[in-house]
Image (tube, helix red, strand yellow):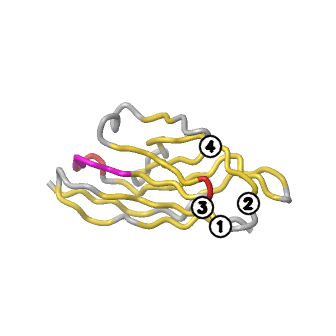
Amino acid sequence: QVQLVESGGGLVQAGGSLRLSCAASGRIFRVNVMGWYRQAPGKERELVAQITSGGSTNYADSVKGRFTISRDNAKNTVYLQMNSLKPEDTFVYYCNANGVVTMRGVADYWGQGTQVTVSS
């Protein structure tokens, strides 16, 4: 069974930084794309950033230049370094692993979510 465990959320003042981590556990051969999404109550989940196993990245326009995504393929772990945080970055952040290859096949997984709150 594959599980994604997130850590690193919390409360920070505007202009501050946080680093989110997400580790995928289980008998995993490979994870194709790992990423971070965020969601406000009653709203759709939106992409923040994603990174392929080869290191190609994609960012939402709203976070470009402030957030950096990285991953450790050997540990099946993805990170999101968030700098210059703004109150409008306040969301629940979810880790996503897309194209997780195990002996059972290929599937996608989500973490449980971690709250990020930025105070003004």
- State the SS at label 3: helix
Mark 3–mark 2 distance (CA, rounded to whole Å): 10 Å
Task: Tell which circle, 3 or 4, labels the residue nearer the N-terminal end.
Answer: 4
Q: Is residue 56 left or right of residue 65?
A: right
In the picture of the structure, the residue carrying the numbered disc 4 is 53
State the image coordinates of residue 20 (x, y, percent, origin top left): 41, 59
Membership of 83 in magenta stretch = yes
The span from disc 4 to disc 1 (Cα, nearest Å) is 16 Å
Label 1 SS: strand
Quadrant of residue 51 within the rendered picture:
top right
Q: Does the residue at mark 1 contact the one at mark 2 (Cβ under 8 Å)?
A: yes
Disc 2: CA contacts within 10 A as few (<14), some (14-19) or many (>=20)? some
Residue 28 badge:
2
Give how far apart the Cα atoms at labels 2 and 4 are: 13 Å
| Identity, as a three-letter code, of the amino acid under mark 3 | Lys
- In primary-sequence order, the first of circles 2 and 4 is 2
Q: Residue at x 28, y 59 (%)?
A: 117
> Considering depth in this image, is 55 or 97 the residue closer to the camera?
55
Q: Which residues are magenta?
A: 81-86
Q: Which mark is residue 79?
A: none
The residue under label 3 is: 75
Residue 54, compared with residue 37, is above or below; it is above
In primary-sequence order, the first of circles 3 and 1 is 1
Q: Residues within 10 Å of mark 3 (few under 14, many from 20)?
A: few
**Residue at image x 46%, y 54%?**
79
Mark 3–mark 4 distance (CA, rounded to whole Å): 12 Å
- The residue singled out by tag 1 in the image is 25
Residue under the point 55% across and 39% down: 55
